[in-house]
Image (tube, rainbow, N blue to C red):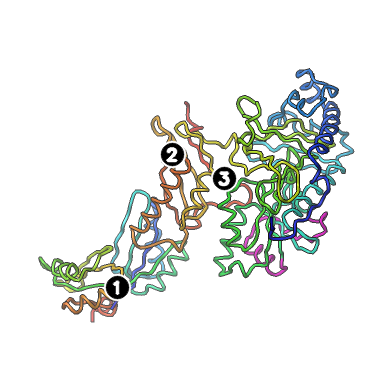
């Protein structure tokens, strides 16, 4: 029930983000969601795409440094308190969030929270046990 | 002292007693001054200094001789410093031209033989046996490195693969397929070979190399450790410059504690570049060389602009030549940042201490306001890239701290993606100083 996320190292220079996106576009790869972390000196682009293996080789062929990490996606109600409820479970379980980002799902009333934990497996079982809906790539990409 | 291999000595002159060496040096110095007086430039310089060959009564009298600098070579372009007729010249080489127009140096047949012998000495000191196969990836051309080492290897009786420079994957293929035990290159090119080999999935055990002889540019002890580990060999440092003869001025022995200057062929001085006075024993200073046996182009007190220190303590290998330490910088690549002297080699030393940073870097200096600002762009090793900002920040901060602790100055560190900083085959261009282009 984990999702493979791609991370790409970006130098903090004009055009670097665009050339990565262009490479993916050229290979017909659609980006489901992304998050960009940056400092003054460099950035890390995190991507969730369906064909992650293909995307990885496309980016690497374009000269990029890519790392694959497992992240945990949870589905929450797209309404006030939806995220707070998940965070409460995470707090109680003593899980440390390295970083997270969110996006709304295809259905209007749902949102997806993506978390990076140090131990993704432990997080999945603790979240599931507390009744949080953890979704896999099938649901994420096919809506099933 | 136990050495990692048999300590063999090529030439008996390498172990002369100090007394015998000095009387040989004095006799040869007098001959050199006489020979130099055939050259109009030196004749005038000697006249200005009011010195004649007869005035050289002891080795200390060398200090009465005029000094020679790079510009003197340029001003006598192309071959104005010949001490022999042109028909006695057997070969011409050129400086690598790091700073401006090339300068030419000429060799007589005797000089070429001397030179090959000098290279044979340090190659033997660094483990070369007649049975070895030596892969040379110095450029074969005007640069003295390729041909100098080539004839030295042949003098020893070993075999040469004159691979020359460029096309690293092909170099690796040749090394593996032909089974070279010895590598000759610049240290930065050896790092490039290691990097390409690693990308091909080849480790130190996949390469037949046992020894390497590096020269042509300054490098650090940390770099030696890294190259030795990655290529699985013992690396030796040698030193030379075309104006003096080329490689073979000095080289390391099995003790690897400094490079023995071939003092029966060169007198070395270590001076303060400002006062021109000798530095205190053991202190770093500019190296100055006088040739003792060169026929075609003798050189008097040539200021190398290379900074190193000299060690006169006895060496367990039995060679008696004074040992010079690594070149820690050049009087002209020394950067003055906010009043602090900084050498690019220090930045390199800092990077080699940080796991995850590649020793590929560019230093950019600017003065946006009144203060110098230094930016060091450093390549990150692919395996050290992380999706976690905290991990990358720690790497960044470690590089920052190491540079500050070694150089004493604060710099701005920029992480660069792997393979984005230009690799060089010869001397790496590592400093871009924007200050020079601006009015002060």
Give the SS element for disc 1: helix
Say which of A106 and B397 sits in front: B397
For mark 2, does the 10 Å Cα neighbourhood hold few (<14), some (14 to 19), or many (20 or more) residues? some
According to the picture, the residue beneath numbered tag 2 turns out to be B409
Q: Residue A58's x, y, as percent? A: 44, 68
Magenta stretch contains residue B176: yes
User: The N terminus of chain B lies in which quarter of the figure?
Assistant: bottom right
Q: Which one is closest to the eye, mark 1 or mark 3?
A: 1
Give the SS element for disc 3: loop
Mark 3 near mark 2, Cβ–Cβ under 8 Å? no
Instruction: Name above or below for residue B205 compared with residue B221.
Output: below
Occupied quadrant, residue B18 = top right
Left or right, residue B80 beside residue A137: right
Left or right, residue B64 beside residue A114: right
The stretch in magenta equals B153-179
**Disc 3 sits on a residue from what chain?**
B
What residue sits 67% from the left and 55% below the top?
B165
User: How many numbered circles are shown?
Assistant: 3
Say which of A31 and B189 sits in front: B189
According to the picture, the residue beneath numbered tag 3 turns out to be B429
Give the SS element for disc 2: loop
**Disc 1 sits on a residue from what chain?**
A
Magenta stretch contains residue A15: no
According to the picture, the residue beneath numbered tag 1 turns out to be A120
What residue sits 72% from the left and 29% below the top?
B68
Say which of B214 and A70 sits in front: B214
Q: Which one is closest to the eye, mark 3 or mark 2?
A: 2
Instruction: Name above or below for residue B383 compared with residue B416.
Output: below
Which circle marks residue A79 in the picture? Answer: none
For mark 1, does the 10 Å Cα neighbourhood hold few (<14), some (14 to 19), or many (20 or more) residues? some
Left or right, residue A109 beside residue B345: left
Q: CA distance from mark 3 to mark 2?
A: 21 Å
């Amino acid at each position: 029930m984990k999702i493979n996320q791609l991370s790409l190292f970006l130098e903090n220079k004009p055009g670097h983000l665009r050339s990565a996106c262009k490479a993916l576009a050229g290979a017909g790869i659609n980006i489901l969601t992304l998050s960009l972390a940056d400092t003054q000196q460099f950035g890390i682009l995190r991507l969730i795409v369906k064909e992650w293996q293909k995307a990885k080789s496309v980016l690497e062929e374009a000269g990029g440094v890519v790392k694959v990490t497992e992240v945990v996606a949870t589905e929450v109600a797209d309404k006030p308190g939806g995220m707070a409820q998940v965070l409460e479970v995470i707090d109680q379980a003593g899980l440390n969030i390295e970083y997270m980002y969110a996006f709304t799902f295809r259905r209007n009333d749902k949102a997806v929270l993506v978390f990076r934990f140090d131990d993704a497996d432990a997080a999945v079982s603790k979240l599931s046990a507390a009744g949080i809906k953890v979704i896999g790539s099938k649901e994420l990409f096919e809506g099933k | 002292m136990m050495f990692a291999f048999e300590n063999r000595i090529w030439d008996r002159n390498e172990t002369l007693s100090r007394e015998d060496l000095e009387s040989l040096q004095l006799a040869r110095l007098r001959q050199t001054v006489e020979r130099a007086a055939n050259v109009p430039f030196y004749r005038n310089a000697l006249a200005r200094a009011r010195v004649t060959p007869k005035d050289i009564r002891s080795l200390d009298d060398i200090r009465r001789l005029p000094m020679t600098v790079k510009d003197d070579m340029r001003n006598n372009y192309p071959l104005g410093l010949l001490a022999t007729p042109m028909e006695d010249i057997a070969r011409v080489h050129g400086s690598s031209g790091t700073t401006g127009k090339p300068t030419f140096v000429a060799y007589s047949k005797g000089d070429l033989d001397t030179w090959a012998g000098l290279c044979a000495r340090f190659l033997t000191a660094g483990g070369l046996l007649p049975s070895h196969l030596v892969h040379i990836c110095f450029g074969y051309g005007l640069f003295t490195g390729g041909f100098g080492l080539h004839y030295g290897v042949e003098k020893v009786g070993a075999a040469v693969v004159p691979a020359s420079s460029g096309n690293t994957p092909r170099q690796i293929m040749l090394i593996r397929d032909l089974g070279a035990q010895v590598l000759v290159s610049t240290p930065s090119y050896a790092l490039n070979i290691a990097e390409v080999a690693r990308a091909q999935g080849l480790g130190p055990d996949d390469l037949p190399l046992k020894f390497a002889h590096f020269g042509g540019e300054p490098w650090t002890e940390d770099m030696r450790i890294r190259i030795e580990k990655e290529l699985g060999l013992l690396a030796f440092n040698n030193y030379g410059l075309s104006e003096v003869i080329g490689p073979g001025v000095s080289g390391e022995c099995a003790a690897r504690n400094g490079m023995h200057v071939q003092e029966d062929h060169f007198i070395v001085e270590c001076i303060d570049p400002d006062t021109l006075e000798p530095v205190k024993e053991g202190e770093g200073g500019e190296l100055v060389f006088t040739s003792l046996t060169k026929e075609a182009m003798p050189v008097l007190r040539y200021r190398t602009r290379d900074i190193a220190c000299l060690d006169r303590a006895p060496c367990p290998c039995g060679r008696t030549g004074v040992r010079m330490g690594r070149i820690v910088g050049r009087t002209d690549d020394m950067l003055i940042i906010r009043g602090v002297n900084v050498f690019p080699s220090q930045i390199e030393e800092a990077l080699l201490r940080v796991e995850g940073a590649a020793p590929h870097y560019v230093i950019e200096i600017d003065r946006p306001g009144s203060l110098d600002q230094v930016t060091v762009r450093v390549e990150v090793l692919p395996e050290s890239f992380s999706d976690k900002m905290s991990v990358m920040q720690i790497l960044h901060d470690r590089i920052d701290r190491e540079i500050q602790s070694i150089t004493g100055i604060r710099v701005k560190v920029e992480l660069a993606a792997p393979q984005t900083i230009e690799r060089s085959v010869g001397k790496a261009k590592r400093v871009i100083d924007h200050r020079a282009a601006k009015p002060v």
